[in-house]
Image: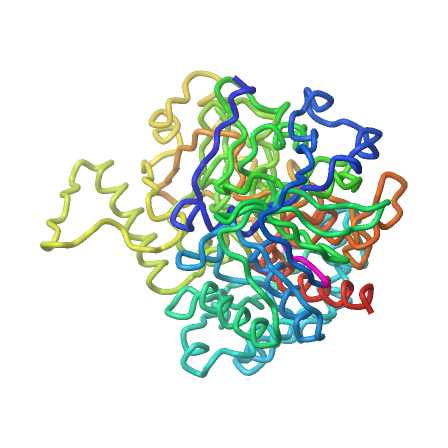
Amino acid sequence: MKSGISRRAFLGLGATAAVAAGAGLAGCSPASSASGTAQAEQGPAAAESSWKTPPAEITDFAKEYDCDVVVCGHGFAGITACRELAEEGYKVILVEKQPEDTYAAVGNEFAALNASILKERGVPEIDPVEFFQNWMTVTGNYPNQELVMKFAQHSGENSDWYLSELSEEDFATMTTAFFPKTEHQLDNIGPIKFWPSVCSFYGDCNQTKIHEYNRAVAQEKGAEFLFGTEALYVIMDDGNVAGLAAKNADGNLKLNAKAVVIACGGFGGNPEMMADLMPDMYHALVGDEQLTSMSANDGRGVQMAYWAGAHLETCPIPGMNMKGLSLPGKMNCLPQSVWIDENGKRFCNEYYATSEQRGLATVYKSRKTKFAVCDANFPEYRQYTIPQHAGFTATEENIASLQESLDKAYAIFKGIYEEPEKEEGEGGPGGGGPMTAVEFIADDTLEGLAGQLGLTGEAATNFVETIANYNAYCEAGADQEFGRDAAVLFPVKEPPFYACTFDPVLGETMVTCGGIITDGDQNALDENFEPISGLYVSGNDCGRRFGYEYITPIPGCSLGMAITLGRECGKSVGAYLG
């Protein structure tokens, strides 16, 4: 049932970390909520949504604090805003829902344009204007142009600042996905460009450690951190921010402040909010499909801003990979193949440039099994990849692993496969990316492969004709059916032939990517698109950074934007307070 939207823990990343990215998950005083009711409702029952009702005002506080600004959330945007404000000399208090002793950041790699560490390693520089134009092209010109350009222009210097406390030993553990380039790695598909300009921290120095470094700098400059503290609502006074109500083991807290920064990490853990604010996906569900998220963040940040009179995004809010990687699963990681539906026909441009958008066609297709088809040359074609999410790094090891998978499938087809004996203590497939668990099916003929896939009658005939037509497009260098770029038209001609099966399931997102409309300073806007005095929103609570889907012209754009725009938000608040 659509109404039974489930939650999902953040696999391997720590659900509590996801919650804390939203940290205090704040709200505002009840008196300020009326303006939100005039906004256009989106979801199926948005007018009755319980989350839109503000909490009762608290009048009895166990403790009271005075500061210049409160930051809600120890995520990437929250910690950078906090550090920036502390370095500017403002008294900052950051509230964080996670306990200090178990605090963990969520995510490990971030996009960085022209960071010093990347330039030192030989990663090519990026023209910020070119990046901006490319971003706006991919997103249909929907995002806030000021925010996108701030990211493009300030990513390098802000990344350097964020990484300023790392030692040489720390940097030695950093890797850069898709760099150096492999032989056939592409920089673009048609007009859409991509860059391998990413800082990946999966080793001993992870993002939790880097957050600790930044926290230490902020604390040295006078910032105070309240861990194990949940923000409840923003306190408003005659249309101006006056502070934050929160609670922890000591009881209810009142933090008097002139400004509040909301950086709470989205609303993936709130089923009602997902249904309301992602109506396009909600209404595309079929059967038992549900909107789910790997994030446990309950949306308090968006709620807080809304209760304070902030304007919700009026277009459906994007989810990270919601229309891509999970639709239909690993198929979107195999763009070099040909995708076939249950009727034996192609149904989309398999190698649409942006991986997060490749599977968009499956949203509006049946949920019957789909197939990815390739031939004996697939290990070569597989090397034509681009630096982004779902990109494949064509190392010799990865290509050899792919060939082994194909050889295994062919041996099974011939009836000569023998399961190798495992050494004692040996586990399953290693960390070769999202394709490690794929089982291929092999056959010497397309007709035979169609039969193994369960295609019969007209569907089997369609399958053979479809591949023949596709091969003709490859030879001519122009896909007359779905416009696949000539650079990635790979024929299916040389036996053996291979296929994978995929069962599409719609509805999962990693995190949500928006909610509140702000100006270029990340100052929340009211129902008339006027700034709300003292209220700022950054990170995944901040709307209009992406289009209808998250995109990665560089891997790790979400964290990269949070780091850069988090600091820029701190600068905006500093200017407001000054």
Q: At 57% across and 23% down in the image, what residue appears? A: 285
Tell me if residue 259 can be seen: yes
Q: Is residue 333 left or right of residue 406?
A: right
Compared with 30, 534 (above or below) is: below
Q: Is residue 43 above or below residue 311?
A: above
- Residue 572 found in image quarter: bottom right
Residue 81 is situated, as x and y percent measured from the top left of the image, at 66, 64
- The quadrant holding residue 258 is bottom right
Instruction: Identify which residue is drawn at 90% across, 41% down.
Output: 528
The one of 223 and 491 positioned closer to us in this rendering: 223
Identity of the residue drawn at 32% across and 38% down: 442
Determine if the magenta segment contains residue 179.
no
| Nearer to me, 239 or 167 | 239
17 and 252: which is toward the camera: 252
Picture coordinates of residue 192 (x, y %)?
68, 55
Type of secondary structure dominating the magenta stretch:
strand
Q: Position of residue 492 (x, y in %)?
A: 46, 43
The magenta stretch is 68-72
Where residue 454 appears, as percent x and y from the top left, is 37, 22
